[in-house]
Amino acid sequence: MENCMIPTAAMKLLPSDITEFLETINVFPDEIRLRIGRPVTLTSGSKSVITNSRPITNCDLETVVSRVFRNSLHSFSEQLCSGYMTCEGGLRVGFSGTASSQGGKVENIRNFSSVNIRIPREIKGCAVPIFENCLKTSPSSLLMCGAPSSGKTTFLRDLTRLCGSLYRTSLIDERGEIAASSLGVPYNDTGMLTDIFDSYPRKAAIETAVRVMSPQIIVCDEIGSADDLLSLEYAVNSGVKLICTCHCTDIESLYRKPNISKLLKAGVFEHLVSIAEHRIVKIVPLADRYD
Amino acid sequence: MIELLGALFLAAAGLYTGMTALNDLKIKERQLKEVVGIVERTGIYLSSCRLTTAEIFARLSHENTCYSDLFTCTGTEPAKETSAQMRVSGLAYCTEFADYLEDLGSTDLEGELAKNRLFTVEAKTALGQAEDKRKKYSRIYPAAGLSAGLTAALLLL
């Protein structure tokens, strides 16, 4: 395991023979994908590597899912229905299978067919240019946008660490991806002044944070729903600055997202940051844009 | 004189055997009461506290019951580990209890609560049967033991 490029936390989830096989692979993956009847696939950046492992069986997937949910599906019903679970070490494990649904809402999942273990990357210092530009002198609100897997969460994690070293920061970690808390202890460095609201529903977390933690900055990942709109406006009206991310390929298309567009027009954000392929594409001060 | 002593010894041995058989029934009944208590508390831990399987077992291992030690687990698969220990424990209802525990955590909350209710009913039925049996044999076993002992003593004399 010493030279293995896959974190131990991820290895612990896999069947032992697959673990032994992956130890021999010389790839530093972002994702480990298991699909029933097919060999293990590793994703690194935009490349997918199909390994020559044995085909994954139904039993393998059941083992992985059982370990992901700590042999306690009953304790994680919401996560089961939402299709992902955050595990030790900040791993985000997504899965697909056959859903039982009622009224358009997933009530249970059985016959798991695919599992995707996403390995988080904590890159300290990657968000320094954003921090220096927008937040060094005083708290300010900013929105980071980028396509899925562009690295938004990595930048947000580092920005939280930087803000949390200077300002009272409340991190709304709905999916447990940013702090990767286990038993209340964050696995990632989120800064000395950061309070973490782990796995809270976002609306409740923002309202609680404003009421009880008097934050200078609230950090949220992947905003965009109508509920977010109300709670974020509530936070801003309470004098709190926001650092958020949202899925969007570029800054222009942000204005085509109805809820985000409302927040932008209301002047909630002072800076927009565009992220692509794990790089900062541009930082736009919104005052300039309105001019 | 020796024959009289031997006869007395045989009668006492018969009575002792009868009392031991009755005591076994009492122990089984007490253990079944503990099983019912454990399963009912598991139901509470599942529904109110939403504890994970490992957390439930950790709580049960700190209780003062015959089964507590079996809930101490060190591995990553507590349900299987505890179930295996339970199966070879020799305690009352251990096979059925092991089957229930082996499956704990494999379904969502609704499923676990349904399984818990079903197992509680089964354990309570077994407890009821054990109580009836103990009541039925509470006089019979000592009397039968004593009678057998006396008969053997008379035959000896």
Image (cartoon, grey):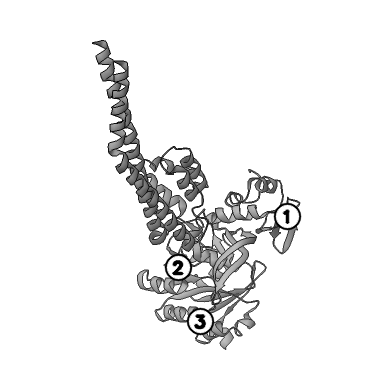
Q: Are marks 2 and 1 on the same chain?
A: yes
Judging depth in this view, the residue of A241 and A21 nearest the camera is A21
Q: Position of residue B16 (x, y in %)?
A: 30, 27
Tell me the quarter of the picture where residue A91 sits: bottom right
In this picture, residue B70 sits left or right of residue B13: right
Instruction: Give the residue type at disc 2.
Output: Tyr
Chain letter of the residue beneath label 2 in the structure image? A
Residue A201 drawn above or below residue A12: below
- Whole-angstrom CA distance, mark 3 to mark 2, is 17 Å
Q: Residue at x 69, y 54 (%)?
A: A56
- Look at the numbered disc 3 and give the secondary structure of its residue: helix
Q: Which residue is mark 1?
A: A39
Q: Which mark is residue A200?
A: 2
Of residues B12 and A54, the one nearer the viewer is B12
Q: Is residue B5 above or below residue A56?
A: above
Give the spatial CA distance, label 1 vs label 3. 41 Å
Mark 2: give few (<14), some (14-19) or many (20+) Cα within 10 Å: some
- Relative placement, left or right, of B125 versus A101 is left
Disc 1 on helix, strand or loop?
loop
Tags 2 and 1 touching, CB below 8 Å: no
What's under tag 1, amino acid-wise?
Pro
Residue A226 image label: 3
For the C terminus of chain B, the quadrant is top left
Compute the Cα span from label 2 to label 1: 36 Å
- Sequence-wise, which precedes: disc 1 or disc 3? 1
Residue B96 pos. (x, y %) = 47, 47
Residue B126: x and y in percent read 39, 48
Q: Kindly identify the amino acid type of the residue bearing the numbered disc 3.
A: Ala
